[in-house]
Amino acid sequence: MSGGDDDRSAQENPDGRLGEGIPHPEAAAGFPGEPDGFQRLWTPHRMVYIDGQDKPKDDRAEECPFCTAPSKTDEDGLIIARGETVYAVLNLYPYNPGHLLICPYRHVPDYTELTGDETVELAEFTQKAMRVIRAVSGPHGFNLGMNQGPVAGAGIAAHLHQHVVPRWGGDANFLPVIAQTKALPQVHADVQARLSKEWNR
């Protein structure tokens, strides 16, 4: 923003805020060095993820969010569907809107430790998740996968989870690379409600 828009906003909101607790995008002018002309997209909510605030302290089931989620309501736990041996839940820190995790109820870390029934239902839930997400938001493709062990990128390695990530053409841009920020157009509650409704249709 520049010129008249900035001046008008400053007059209407002399404290520099857009409503309670929402700051204006920060102007580049006034900082040391050459102004770069960019506005700032603040994402303070991501500090919870960066600081590891929600990560379990250890590998015990009592500390595991995938073990505690099923004890909550679907809305509070962000759960989309519950099966006999596995359940589908929204990723709290999604790569894209509708990013689901298919988790066994049992606290097991490795794919080879699943029982036959768990393996079958995990596969069936993955297929159902793809159908549901396609019906709700029409992605162009999907990434499916499991990160086995911390060295492979598993954020919570002690409890197996299958990622179902919807993808759209052009959904990857400079923000995650340059700013460690992912722009998400939908909040969790909206995504949870829409996917749950379609899953149970």
Image (spheres, grey):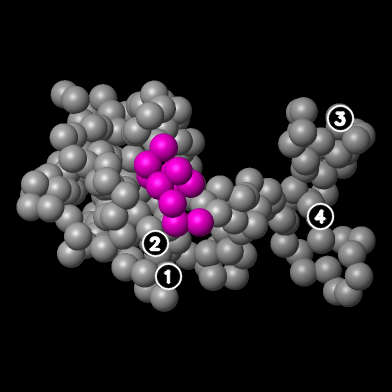
Rendered position, 181 above or below 77: below
Q: Which residue is mark 4?
A: 27
Residue kind at label 4, given as amino acid type: Ala
Helix, strand or loop under label 2: loop
Q: CA gap, disc 4 to disc 3?
A: 17 Å
Instruction: Verify CB contact (< 8 Å) between mark 1 and mark 2.
Output: yes
- Numbered disc in front, either 2 or 3: 2
The mark nearer the N terminus, 3 or 1, is: 3
Label 1 CA crowd tier, 10 Å (few <14, some 14–19, many 20+): few
Q: Which residues lie in the magenta part?
A: 58-68
Q: CA gap, disc 3 to disc 1?
A: 50 Å
Helix, strand or loop under label 3: helix
Q: Position of residue 15 (x, y in %)?
A: 90, 35
In reply to whether residue 61 is colored magenta, the answer given is yes
Q: CA gap, disc 2 to disc 3?
A: 50 Å
Residue shown at 53%/64% (left/top)? 176
Q: CA gap, disc 4 to disc 2?
A: 41 Å
Q: CA gap, disc 1 to disc 4?
A: 39 Å
Residue 123 in sight here: no
Q: Position of residue 77 (x, y in %)?
A: 41, 32
Residue 197 in sight here: yes
Disc ID at residue 157: 2
Q: CA gap, disc 1 to disc 2?
A: 6 Å
Q: Which residue is mark 3?
A: 12
Q: Position of residue 11 (x, y in %)?
A: 90, 33
- Numbered disc in front, either 4 or 2: 2
Disc ID at residue 150: 1
